[in-house]
Amino acid sequence: MFIQTESTPNPATLKFIPGREVMSEGVADFRTPEEAVASPLARRLFEIDGVEGVFFGADFVAVTKGTGEWQHLKPPILGAIMEHFTSGAPLFETGAAAAAPEEGESDDDDVVAQIKELLDTRIRPAVAQDGGDIAFHSFKDGTVYLHMRGACAGCPASTMTLKQGIENMLRHYVPEVETVEPIL
């Protein structure tokens, strides 16, 4: 098994591509070892000193480091991912699943449908290429609230992406949108 690695705009996050499906649908974001309890792979990755976040996308695993250098962290991360996928173990233990973020209150169902469609068709695929994900949380009083996950969480470029990219696109296609804000 050959696992490719790609850098992301977030220097603290690397994208590991095992050459096979990771999540058949949705994504999973683990910011602490306690959140990773349902996933054997995420638990194993958190056992590596310096790992502070694990994100599963459709065909990649993004790992965020806290301390340490990638040259020292990559070998044990690659080993854990390779061992997991070659063993045939499930990504989640039986009966466990990734928790989706709760969606907040919304003041207009048609506007929310437009926002979600743009996020799903234009924004999320582009963000996934960089090892992250952006999920809708709510729309209230002209403001769209989004969850930044994976490489997007804590990325120095995420504010620029959010304001100059996503906000401009949503305002262009959905006139009711005035601003976009992250939910931490």
Image (spheres, rainbow, N blue to C red):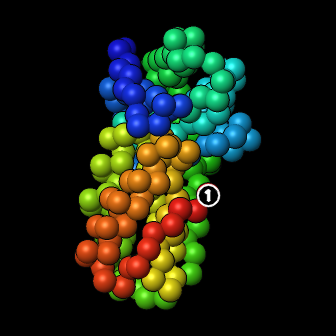
- Return the x and y of residue 90 as percentages of the image width and height: 53, 33
Using the image as rendered, state which of residue 141 and residue 15 is in the foreground: 141
Q: Nearer the viewer, residue 41 or 133?
A: 133
Mark 1 = which residue? 184
Q: Nearer the viewer, residue 127 or 89?
A: 127
Task: Tally the marks.
Answer: 1
| Above or below: residue 3 compared with residue 13 | above
- Dot 1, how many residues are within 10 Å of its Cα: few (below 14), some (14-19), or many (20+)? few
Residue at position x 56%, y 81% from top? 105
Residue in view at x 46 percent, y 23 percent: 85
Picture quadrant of residue 119: bottom left
Q: Is residue 106 visible?
A: no
Name the residue: 37% across, 26% down. 6
Res. 130 in view: yes
Q: Quadrant of the C terminus?
A: bottom right
Check disc 1 and give the amino acid type.
Leu
Measured from the top left, where is residue 134 in percent x and y? Answer: 44, 56
Q: Between residue 10 and residue 26, name the one nearer to us.
A: 10
Horizontal side of residue 119 vs 173, given as left or right: right
In the visual, does 54 lie left or right of 17?
A: right
> Is residue 24 rendered to the left or right of residue 65?
left
Question: Does 81 sit above or below residue 29?
Answer: above
Q: Residue at x 58, y 62 (%)?
A: 183
Disc 1 element = loop
Picture coordinates of residue 8, whole percent (x, y):
40, 34
> For the view shown, which residue lies furthest in the right direction?
34
Q: Quadrant of the N terminus?
A: top left
Q: Which picture quadrant has residue 179?
A: bottom left
Quadrant housing residue 114:
bottom left
